[in-house]
Amino acid sequence: MMRTRGTGLLRTLCCLAFALAACGADTAVFSPATANDNLKLFEYDPSAPLDPRVVSSEKRQGYTLQQLTYTSPKGGRVPAFLLIPDGRGPFPGVLLLHGMPSSAQGMLPEAERLARLGAISLAISAPFARSHRIGVQRGLNFDERDRDEQIQLIIDLRRGVDLLLSRPDVAKDRLGYVGISYGGAQGGLLAGVETRIKAYALVVGDGGLVTHLTGPDDRNGYLKSLPPERVKRWLATMEPIEPIRWVGRAAPAHLLFQNGRSDTMVPPADGRAYQEAGSEPKKLLWYDAEHGLNVEAVRDRHTWLAEQIGIRKELPGRAQQAEASSKNTRRRSGHSDGA
């Protein structure tokens, strides 16, 4: 998620609890049953045309990288990267979501690893990372726009599933999801809505934006200056779609949670609460690492996906090479592990 003290935007996002306490907010009760009333928020017309448009296509070692867009039911187009392994298939399909602030480009290293392990990988950009938001605040607005964009994100991810399933080279019963940080949190919401994905890897996620900004270490900052009524309104719009309220609905899909014991962006207490809310079957993995985790986590995630959806198992030493490549890519693209 976004808990750091380094940049202006991230400082802005680390300060809600003081204002929430002043407003008497209660974020401790999470009931999967309450999600039933809100399922209609994430409905769309599955028969509407996706209209995928390939912007560019590049042959790389072991796979083809396509930059494309497809139609969002909520307006505009969804920018994405599609990575197609060499060979005939059918291949497992994996949907990927990045952190905040970041974009689909931030998930390319993971998508590339998965493509080389025999998965068709689709990484999309969240609404806050799209061109219509360039030049304005990229992140949270603390008003109803945050709710609208989170709902749009889940619907766009569901349309991403439609796109994968529309391909004859995708095995329709072998779909997975990998979300990191913000993507790890939003994956819990998706898991409570989308039934066609078999396995969700939720990496360094917490219970969602409200959870993320109401911890005991978020006592001072930007929202202290906001009118209490604005904070109340924001809570009222966001709490019903908080991922920790939905991840308990994921069954029969399998869940993998990966968290770091030294993570300061998603403190262990938040990670544990998110894990506990998830439905069975689930696997909980902890690492002596910070928010970016480590090579062991990459290897464990890919081993788990091999068991769940049938990607190839990673060769010894390949995870270390992939991690080095990932760090170089993040440095070139300006994305951090804390996104």
Image (spheres, rainbow, N blue to C red):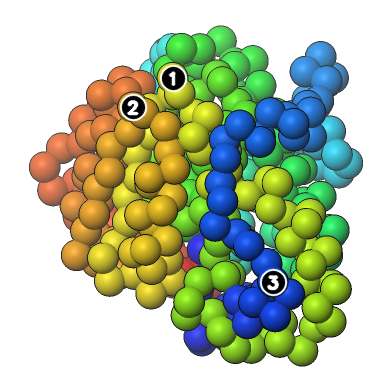
Q: Disc 2 to disc 3, how far (Cα)?
A: 35 Å
Q: Disc 1 to disc 3, how far (Cα)?
A: 36 Å
* Mark 1: secondary structure: loop
**Label for residue 306?**
none
Q: In which quarter of the image is residue 17?
A: bottom right
Which is more toward the observer, 288 or 329? 288
- Nearer to us of marks 2 and 3 is 3
Relative horizontal placement of residue 264, taking residue 151 as reference (left or right): left
- In terms of sequence position, does the residue under pointer 2 or pointer 3 come before the other? 3
Q: Using the rendered image of the protein, determine whether residue 76 is visible from the camera's viewpoint.
A: yes
Q: Position of residue 237 (x, y in %)?
A: 79, 54
Furthest residue toward left: 316
Q: Where is residue 173 in the image (x, y as percent from the top left)?
A: 46, 12
Q: Say which residue appears at 38% left-offset and 34% top-offset.
A: 255
Residue type at tag 1:
Pro
Badge 1: few (under 14), some or many (20 or more) residues near its Cα, within 10 Å?
Answer: some
Which is more toward the observer, 64 or 261? 261
Q: Disc 1 to disc 2, how far (Cα)?
A: 7 Å
Residue bearing the label numbered 1: 252
**Label for residue 281?**
2
Residue bearing the label numbered 3: 24
Relative horizontal placement of residue 33, taking residue 203 as reference (left or right): right
* Mark 2: secondary structure: loop
Q: Say which residue appears at 74% left-offset and 34% top-offset.
A: 38
Q: Say which residue appears at 66% left-offset and 36% top-offset.
A: 34
